[in-house]
Amino acid sequence: MTTKYDEMWEKLNLDLKAHEGLLEVLGKFYGDIYLSQEGRLKGMGYLNFVLSEVHGLRIQELQEAKARGRKVVGTFCIFVPEEIVLAADAVCVGLCAGAEIGREAAEKFLPRNTCALIKSFVGFKMARLCPFMESCDLVVGETTCDGKKKAYEIFADYAPIYVMEIPQMKNVCDRDLWKVEVERFRQKIEEVTGKTITAAKLKEAIRLVNDRRRVLQRLNQLRAAVPTPISGRDVLLVNQISFYDDPARFTTKISELCDELERRVEKGEGIVPQNTLRLMLSGCPMAVPNWKLPYLIESSGAVVVGEESCIGTRNIRDLVDESGETLEEMLDALVDRYMRIDCACFTPNRERLENVVNMARNLEVDGVIHYSLNFCQPYAIEAFKVGKTLEEAGIPMLSIETDYSMEDVEQLKTRVEAFVEMLR
Protein backbone atom coordinates (compact mmCIF):
# COMPACT_ATOMS: atom_id res chain seq x y z
CA MET A 1 0.00 0.00 0.00
CA THR A 2 1.48 3.32 -1.12
CA THR A 3 1.31 6.29 1.27
CA LYS A 4 2.36 9.92 1.10
CA TYR A 5 5.20 9.13 3.51
CA ASP A 6 6.84 6.35 1.48
CA GLU A 7 9.47 8.63 -0.01
CA MET A 8 10.39 9.98 3.43
CA TRP A 9 10.60 6.47 4.90
CA GLU A 10 12.72 5.31 1.96
CA LYS A 11 15.16 8.17 2.54
CA LEU A 12 15.39 7.03 6.16
CA ASN A 13 16.37 3.56 4.87
CA LEU A 14 13.39 1.76 6.40
CA ASP A 15 12.45 -1.72 5.25
CA LEU A 16 9.20 -0.53 3.65
CA LYS A 17 7.52 -3.93 3.41
CA ALA A 18 8.27 -4.89 7.03
CA HIS A 19 7.37 -1.39 8.18
CA GLU A 20 4.00 -1.61 6.42
CA GLY A 21 3.36 -4.85 8.26
CA LEU A 22 4.22 -3.20 11.57
CA LEU A 23 1.79 -0.33 10.96
CA GLU A 24 -1.00 -2.74 9.99
CA VAL A 25 -0.54 -4.73 13.20
CA LEU A 26 -0.32 -1.55 15.26
CA GLY A 27 -3.53 -0.19 13.71
CA LYS A 28 -5.49 -3.38 14.37
CA PHE A 29 -4.12 -3.70 17.90
CA TYR A 30 -5.03 -0.08 18.65
CA GLY A 31 -8.52 -0.52 17.26
CA ASP A 32 -9.20 -3.64 19.32
CA ILE A 33 -7.83 -2.25 22.58
CA TYR A 34 -8.65 1.45 22.41
CA LEU A 35 -11.30 2.30 19.84
CA SER A 36 -13.53 -0.48 21.15
CA GLN A 37 -13.96 1.34 24.48
CA GLU A 38 -17.30 2.95 25.28
CA GLY A 39 -17.69 6.41 26.79
CA ARG A 40 -14.24 7.70 25.80
CA LEU A 41 -13.63 11.41 26.19
CA LYS A 42 -13.66 13.69 23.15
CA GLY A 43 -10.12 14.77 24.05
CA MET A 44 -8.90 11.28 23.22
CA GLY A 45 -9.33 12.21 19.57
CA TYR A 46 -5.97 13.95 19.85
CA LEU A 47 -4.33 10.70 20.95
CA ASN A 48 -6.07 8.75 18.18
CA PHE A 49 -4.63 11.21 15.68
CA VAL A 50 -1.14 11.09 17.17
CA LEU A 51 -1.12 7.28 17.05
CA SER A 52 -2.43 7.25 13.49
CA GLU A 53 0.44 9.55 12.48
CA VAL A 54 3.07 8.14 14.84
CA HIS A 55 5.44 7.25 11.99
CA GLY A 56 4.04 9.83 9.60
CA LEU A 57 3.37 13.45 10.49
CA ARG A 58 5.56 13.43 13.62
CA ILE A 59 8.50 12.04 11.64
CA GLN A 60 7.86 14.68 8.98
CA GLU A 61 8.05 17.32 11.71
CA LEU A 62 11.40 15.90 12.83
CA GLN A 63 12.73 16.02 9.27
CA GLU A 64 11.58 19.62 8.90
CA ALA A 65 13.30 20.51 12.18
CA LYS A 66 16.51 18.88 10.96
CA ALA A 67 16.26 20.84 7.69
CA ARG A 68 16.21 24.03 9.80
CA GLY A 69 19.42 22.98 11.53
CA ARG A 70 17.98 21.44 14.70
CA LYS A 71 19.34 18.14 15.97
CA VAL A 72 17.24 15.16 17.09
CA VAL A 73 18.30 13.30 20.24
CA GLY A 74 16.79 9.92 21.11
CA THR A 75 16.68 8.48 24.63
CA PHE A 76 15.76 5.20 26.31
CA CYS A 77 15.37 6.30 29.91
CA ILE A 78 13.81 9.00 32.09
CA PHE A 79 17.22 9.56 33.70
CA VAL A 80 18.40 11.50 30.65
CA PRO A 81 17.78 15.21 31.41
CA GLU A 82 15.57 16.30 28.54
CA GLU A 83 15.86 19.91 29.69
CA ILE A 84 19.49 20.03 28.56
CA VAL A 85 18.55 18.76 25.09
CA LEU A 86 15.78 21.35 24.71
CA ALA A 87 18.02 24.14 26.01
CA ALA A 88 20.30 23.52 23.02
CA ASP A 89 17.31 23.93 20.66
CA ALA A 90 17.35 20.21 19.87
CA VAL A 91 14.37 17.83 19.74
CA CYS A 92 14.17 15.00 22.28
CA VAL A 93 12.26 11.78 21.51
CA GLY A 94 11.81 8.51 23.38
CA LEU A 95 13.02 5.38 21.59
CA CYS A 96 11.78 2.53 23.79
CA ALA A 97 9.72 0.01 21.86
CA GLY A 98 7.04 -2.34 23.10
CA ALA A 99 6.64 -4.80 20.23
CA GLU A 100 8.43 -8.05 19.42
CA ILE A 101 8.32 -7.63 15.65
CA GLY A 102 12.11 -7.13 15.45
CA ARG A 103 12.91 -10.02 17.80
CA GLU A 104 14.49 -12.29 15.18
CA ALA A 105 16.81 -9.50 14.03
CA ALA A 106 17.77 -8.73 17.64
CA GLU A 107 18.49 -12.37 18.50
CA LYS A 108 21.22 -12.44 15.87
CA PHE A 109 23.13 -10.16 18.24
CA LEU A 110 21.63 -10.78 21.68
CA PRO A 111 20.95 -13.90 23.79
CA ARG A 112 17.37 -15.12 23.67
CA ASN A 113 17.05 -14.64 27.43
CA THR A 114 17.44 -10.87 27.12
CA CYS A 115 14.61 -8.66 28.33
CA ALA A 116 11.97 -7.82 25.72
CA LEU A 117 12.50 -4.06 25.94
CA ILE A 118 16.18 -4.38 25.00
CA LYS A 119 15.46 -6.88 22.23
CA SER A 120 12.73 -4.61 20.93
CA PHE A 121 14.79 -1.46 20.50
CA VAL A 122 17.77 -3.39 19.13
CA GLY A 123 15.47 -5.32 16.80
CA PHE A 124 13.77 -2.15 15.57
CA LYS A 125 17.19 -0.77 14.64
CA MET A 126 18.57 -3.91 13.03
CA ALA A 127 15.34 -4.61 11.11
CA ARG A 128 15.12 -0.95 9.99
CA LEU A 129 11.62 -0.47 11.39
CA CYS A 130 11.82 2.71 13.46
CA PRO A 131 11.86 6.12 11.73
CA PHE A 132 12.48 7.80 15.11
CA MET A 133 15.80 5.97 15.48
CA GLU A 134 16.76 6.70 11.90
CA SER A 135 16.03 10.41 12.45
CA CYS A 136 18.39 10.73 15.43
CA ASP A 137 21.64 12.66 15.30
CA LEU A 138 22.51 11.22 18.70
CA VAL A 139 21.15 8.30 20.74
CA VAL A 140 21.63 8.51 24.50
CA GLY A 141 21.90 5.34 26.54
CA GLU A 142 22.36 4.88 30.28
CA THR A 143 23.67 2.25 32.68
CA THR A 144 20.43 1.33 34.46
CA CYS A 145 20.98 -2.40 33.86
CA ASP A 146 23.72 -4.74 32.64
CA GLY A 147 21.65 -5.84 29.64
CA LYS A 148 21.35 -2.30 28.35
CA LYS A 149 25.03 -1.55 28.95
CA LYS A 150 26.18 -4.47 26.82
CA ALA A 151 23.50 -3.95 24.17
CA TYR A 152 24.69 -0.36 23.69
CA GLU A 153 28.15 -1.70 22.81
CA ILE A 154 26.56 -3.53 19.86
CA PHE A 155 24.23 -0.63 19.06
CA ALA A 156 27.23 1.70 18.81
CA ASP A 157 28.29 0.01 15.56
CA TYR A 158 25.01 1.07 13.93
CA ALA A 159 24.12 4.45 15.45
CA PRO A 160 25.85 7.46 17.07
CA ILE A 161 25.42 6.60 20.75
CA TYR A 162 26.46 8.28 23.99
CA VAL A 163 26.11 6.54 27.36
CA MET A 164 25.51 8.23 30.71
CA GLU A 165 26.64 6.47 33.88
CA ILE A 166 23.83 6.21 36.44
CA PRO A 167 24.84 5.87 40.11
CA GLN A 168 23.71 2.68 41.82
CA MET A 169 23.41 4.15 45.32
CA LYS A 170 22.38 7.51 46.76
CA ASN A 171 25.26 8.58 48.95
CA VAL A 172 27.03 11.95 48.73
CA CYS A 173 29.70 10.49 46.45
CA ASP A 174 26.98 9.14 44.15
CA ARG A 175 25.47 12.60 43.78
CA ASP A 176 28.95 13.90 42.96
CA LEU A 177 29.26 11.26 40.23
CA TRP A 178 25.84 12.15 38.84
CA LYS A 179 26.67 15.86 38.77
CA VAL A 180 29.78 15.10 36.72
CA GLU A 181 27.67 13.00 34.35
CA VAL A 182 25.08 15.77 33.90
CA GLU A 183 27.84 18.28 33.18
CA ARG A 184 29.49 15.85 30.74
CA PHE A 185 26.13 15.40 29.03
CA ARG A 186 25.70 19.16 28.71
CA GLN A 187 29.08 19.38 26.99
CA LYS A 188 28.19 16.52 24.63
CA ILE A 189 24.90 18.15 23.64
CA GLU A 190 26.67 21.45 22.99
CA GLU A 191 29.20 19.59 20.83
CA VAL A 192 26.52 17.79 18.80
CA THR A 193 24.27 20.83 18.32
CA GLY A 194 27.04 23.43 17.97
CA LYS A 195 25.11 25.63 20.41
CA THR A 196 25.98 26.96 23.84
CA ILE A 197 23.44 26.29 26.58
CA THR A 198 22.74 29.55 28.36
CA ALA A 199 21.06 30.13 31.71
CA ALA A 200 18.09 31.76 29.96
CA LYS A 201 17.63 28.80 27.58
CA LEU A 202 17.94 26.24 30.35
CA LYS A 203 15.45 28.11 32.53
CA GLU A 204 12.97 28.12 29.65
CA ALA A 205 13.49 24.39 29.04
CA ILE A 206 13.04 23.54 32.73
CA ARG A 207 9.74 25.40 32.78
CA LEU A 208 8.59 23.69 29.57
CA VAL A 209 9.25 20.17 30.88
CA ASN A 210 7.87 21.03 34.33
CA ASP A 211 4.66 22.23 32.68
CA ARG A 212 4.29 18.85 31.00
CA ARG A 213 4.86 17.12 34.34
CA ARG A 214 2.29 19.40 35.99
CA VAL A 215 -0.43 18.59 33.47
CA LEU A 216 0.23 14.87 33.93
CA GLN A 217 0.09 15.31 37.70
CA ARG A 218 -3.27 17.03 37.22
CA LEU A 219 -4.44 14.11 35.09
CA ASN A 220 -3.46 11.66 37.83
CA GLN A 221 -5.30 13.71 40.46
CA LEU A 222 -8.47 13.71 38.36
CA ARG A 223 -8.37 9.99 37.56
CA ALA A 224 -8.13 9.27 41.31
CA ALA A 225 -11.81 10.24 41.67
CA VAL A 226 -14.42 7.60 42.49
CA PRO A 227 -15.70 6.55 40.04
CA THR A 228 -12.62 7.12 37.90
CA PRO A 229 -13.48 9.24 34.84
CA ILE A 230 -10.95 7.67 32.44
CA SER A 231 -9.65 4.19 31.75
CA GLY A 232 -6.15 3.16 32.75
CA ARG A 233 -5.47 2.24 29.14
CA ASP A 234 -6.13 5.79 28.02
CA VAL A 235 -3.92 7.31 30.72
CA LEU A 236 -1.13 4.88 29.82
CA LEU A 237 -1.45 6.06 26.22
CA VAL A 238 -1.24 9.71 27.32
CA ASN A 239 1.99 8.97 29.20
CA GLN A 240 3.45 7.00 26.30
CA ILE A 241 2.77 9.80 23.82
CA SER A 242 4.40 12.35 26.14
CA PHE A 243 7.78 10.87 25.22
CA TYR A 244 7.72 11.74 21.54
CA ASP A 245 5.18 14.46 20.85
CA ASP A 246 6.10 18.15 20.90
CA PRO A 247 6.09 19.08 24.63
CA ALA A 248 4.26 22.41 24.29
CA ARG A 249 1.55 20.95 22.04
CA PHE A 250 1.19 17.91 24.27
CA THR A 251 0.76 20.05 27.40
CA THR A 252 -1.92 22.18 25.72
CA LYS A 253 -3.89 19.17 24.48
CA ILE A 254 -3.72 17.23 27.75
CA SER A 255 -4.75 20.37 29.62
CA GLU A 256 -7.87 20.45 27.44
CA LEU A 257 -8.43 16.76 28.18
CA CYS A 258 -8.15 17.50 31.92
CA ASP A 259 -10.75 20.26 31.59
CA GLU A 260 -13.10 17.69 30.10
CA LEU A 261 -12.25 15.22 32.86
CA GLU A 262 -12.89 17.86 35.50
CA ARG A 263 -16.41 18.41 34.17
CA ARG A 264 -17.01 14.68 34.23
CA VAL A 265 -15.77 14.41 37.84
CA GLU A 266 -17.96 17.34 38.94
CA LYS A 267 -20.99 15.49 37.55
CA GLY A 268 -19.94 12.28 39.31
CA GLU A 269 -19.62 10.47 35.99
CA GLY A 270 -17.18 7.60 35.56
CA ILE A 271 -15.85 5.44 32.78
CA VAL A 272 -16.85 2.47 34.98
CA PRO A 273 -19.44 1.95 37.76
CA GLN A 274 -18.57 3.30 41.20
CA ASN A 275 -18.10 -0.14 42.76
CA THR A 276 -15.54 -1.29 40.15
CA LEU A 277 -12.38 -2.73 41.69
CA ARG A 278 -9.49 -0.26 41.58
CA LEU A 279 -6.03 -1.65 40.77
CA MET A 280 -2.59 -0.10 40.49
CA LEU A 281 0.20 -1.25 38.20
CA SER A 282 3.75 -1.23 39.53
CA GLY A 283 7.11 -2.11 38.01
CA CYS A 284 8.61 -2.03 34.52
CA PRO A 285 7.77 0.65 31.95
CA MET A 286 5.31 -0.10 29.13
CA ALA A 287 6.37 1.36 25.79
CA VAL A 288 4.08 1.64 22.72
CA PRO A 289 2.39 -0.69 21.79
CA ASN A 290 2.70 -2.73 24.99
CA TRP A 291 -0.95 -2.53 26.08
CA LYS A 292 -1.52 -6.23 26.78
CA LEU A 293 -1.69 -6.29 30.57
CA PRO A 294 -3.81 -3.14 31.11
CA TYR A 295 -6.27 -4.46 28.52
CA LEU A 296 -6.51 -7.82 30.29
CA ILE A 297 -7.04 -6.12 33.65
CA GLU A 298 -9.76 -3.82 32.38
CA SER A 299 -11.44 -6.69 30.54
CA SER A 300 -11.61 -8.63 33.81
CA GLY A 301 -13.94 -6.32 35.71
CA ALA A 302 -11.35 -3.96 37.24
CA VAL A 303 -9.94 -0.56 36.31
CA VAL A 304 -6.35 0.70 36.50
CA VAL A 305 -6.16 3.96 38.45
CA GLY A 306 -2.39 4.42 38.71
CA GLU A 307 0.97 3.35 37.29
CA GLU A 308 4.03 3.25 39.53
CA SER A 309 6.51 3.03 36.67
CA CYS A 310 8.80 5.06 34.44
CA ILE A 311 5.82 5.58 32.13
CA GLY A 312 3.77 6.84 35.05
CA THR A 313 4.42 8.52 38.38
CA ARG A 314 8.16 7.80 38.46
CA ASN A 315 8.56 10.12 35.50
CA ILE A 316 6.39 13.00 36.74
CA ARG A 317 6.34 12.81 40.55
CA ASP A 318 9.06 15.46 41.08
CA LEU A 319 9.53 18.84 39.46
CA VAL A 320 12.83 20.62 38.88
CA ASP A 321 13.29 23.59 41.22
CA GLU A 322 12.69 26.68 39.06
CA SER A 323 14.19 29.24 41.47
CA GLY A 324 17.75 29.04 40.11
CA GLU A 325 19.06 31.94 38.04
CA THR A 326 22.60 30.91 37.16
CA LEU A 327 23.56 27.97 34.96
CA GLU A 328 25.27 26.31 37.92
CA GLU A 329 22.19 26.63 40.13
CA MET A 330 19.94 25.15 37.46
CA LEU A 331 22.30 22.25 36.75
CA ASP A 332 22.32 21.51 40.49
CA ALA A 333 18.52 21.57 40.48
CA LEU A 334 18.51 19.05 37.61
CA VAL A 335 20.99 16.82 39.45
CA ASP A 336 18.84 16.82 42.60
CA ARG A 337 15.57 16.20 40.78
CA TYR A 338 16.85 13.27 38.72
CA MET A 339 18.55 11.69 41.76
CA ARG A 340 15.09 11.40 43.35
CA ILE A 341 14.01 8.86 40.70
CA ASP A 342 13.40 5.53 42.49
CA CYS A 343 14.49 3.15 39.72
CA ALA A 344 15.08 -0.49 40.67
CA CYS A 345 18.72 -0.03 39.63
CA PHE A 346 19.34 1.57 43.05
CA THR A 347 20.35 -0.37 46.13
CA PRO A 348 18.92 -0.15 48.67
CA ASN A 349 15.70 1.23 47.21
CA ARG A 350 13.68 2.19 50.27
CA GLU A 351 12.23 5.23 48.49
CA ARG A 352 10.38 3.05 46.00
CA LEU A 353 8.90 0.84 48.71
CA GLU A 354 7.58 3.91 50.51
CA ASN A 355 6.26 5.44 47.29
CA VAL A 356 4.43 2.25 46.25
CA VAL A 357 2.58 2.00 49.55
CA ASN A 358 1.77 5.72 49.72
CA MET A 359 0.49 5.72 46.17
CA ALA A 360 -1.68 2.64 46.73
CA ARG A 361 -3.20 4.21 49.84
CA ASN A 362 -3.76 7.61 48.25
CA LEU A 363 -5.53 6.01 45.29
CA GLU A 364 -7.57 3.76 47.59
CA VAL A 365 -6.77 0.73 45.46
CA ASP A 366 -8.06 -2.74 46.19
CA GLY A 367 -4.84 -4.35 45.02
CA VAL A 368 -1.56 -3.95 43.13
CA ILE A 369 -0.31 -5.88 40.10
CA HIS A 370 3.48 -5.87 39.93
CA TYR A 371 4.64 -6.19 36.33
CA SER A 372 8.12 -7.35 35.31
CA LEU A 373 9.43 -8.10 31.87
CA ASN A 374 10.95 -11.57 31.55
CA PHE A 375 14.68 -11.45 32.39
CA CYS A 376 14.44 -7.93 33.87
CA GLN A 377 16.40 -8.79 37.01
CA PRO A 378 16.15 -5.43 38.86
CA TYR A 379 12.34 -5.28 38.86
CA ALA A 380 11.75 -9.03 39.05
CA ILE A 381 13.94 -9.36 42.14
CA GLU A 382 12.63 -6.17 43.73
CA ALA A 383 9.08 -7.53 43.36
CA PHE A 384 9.77 -9.65 46.47
CA LYS A 385 10.37 -6.62 48.70
CA VAL A 386 7.52 -4.69 47.11
CA GLY A 387 5.17 -7.58 47.82
CA LYS A 388 6.38 -7.92 51.40
CA THR A 389 5.99 -4.18 52.04
CA LEU A 390 2.48 -4.14 50.56
CA GLU A 391 1.52 -7.21 52.57
CA GLU A 392 2.59 -5.43 55.77
CA ALA A 393 0.38 -2.51 54.71
CA GLY A 394 -2.57 -4.86 54.15
CA ILE A 395 -2.62 -4.38 50.37
CA PRO A 396 -2.85 -7.53 48.17
CA MET A 397 -0.37 -7.90 45.29
CA LEU A 398 -0.17 -10.14 42.24
CA SER A 399 3.27 -10.51 40.65
CA ILE A 400 3.38 -11.08 36.89
CA GLU A 401 6.32 -11.66 34.55
CA THR A 402 5.71 -11.57 30.82
CA ASP A 403 7.06 -10.22 27.53
CA TYR A 404 5.62 -8.61 24.39
CA SER A 405 4.29 -11.78 22.78
CA MET A 406 0.63 -12.80 22.84
CA GLU A 407 1.41 -16.46 23.58
CA ASP A 408 0.62 -16.18 27.30
CA VAL A 409 -2.56 -14.08 27.01
CA GLU A 410 -4.91 -16.83 28.16
CA GLN A 411 -2.68 -17.77 31.06
CA LEU A 412 -2.38 -14.13 32.16
CA LYS A 413 -6.12 -13.64 31.77
CA THR A 414 -6.78 -16.58 34.08
CA ARG A 415 -4.40 -15.23 36.73
CA VAL A 416 -5.75 -11.68 36.56
CA GLU A 417 -9.36 -12.86 36.72
CA ALA A 418 -8.54 -15.05 39.73
CA PHE A 419 -6.88 -12.07 41.48
CA VAL A 420 -9.89 -9.85 40.76
CA GLU A 421 -12.26 -12.54 42.02
CA MET A 422 -10.20 -12.93 45.19
CA LEU A 423 -10.35 -9.18 45.84
CA ARG A 424 -14.14 -9.25 45.46
Image (cartoon, rainbow, N blue to C red):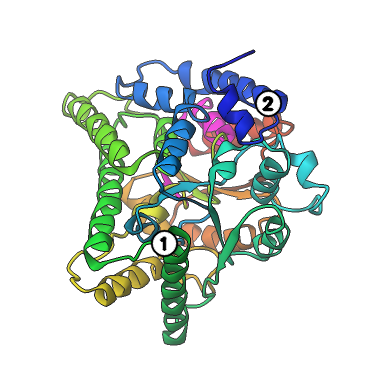
Report x, y in % for residue 199.
24, 67
The residue segment tinted magenta is: 290-309
Asked where in the image residue 162 lies, by quadrant, the reply is: bottom right
* Marker disc for residue 118: none
Crowding at label 1, few (<14), some or many (≥20) Cα neighbours within 10 Å?
A: few
Q: Residue at x 28, y 63 (%)?
A: 320
Read off the residue under disc 2.
Answer: 16
Name the residue type under label 1. Answer: Gly
In the image, taking residue 292 as reference, residue 79 lies left or right, namely left
In the image, taking residue 371 as reference, residue 183 lies left or right, namely left
Name the residue type under label 2. Answer: Leu
Q: Residue at x 38, y 68 (%)?
A: 340
Asked where in the image residue 318 lies, by quadrant, the reply is: bottom left
Element type at mark 1: loop
- Of the 4 image quadrants, the one containing the N terminus is top right
Q: Is residue 375 visible?
A: yes
What is the residue that sits farthest to the bottom in this orientation? 173
Read off the residue under disc 1.
Answer: 194
Q: Nearer the viewer, mark 1 or mark 2?
A: 1
Residue 340 lies in magenta, yes or no?
Answer: no
Mark positioned earlier in the residue sequence (1 or 2): 2
Residue in the foreground of this view, choosing between 271 and 207: 207
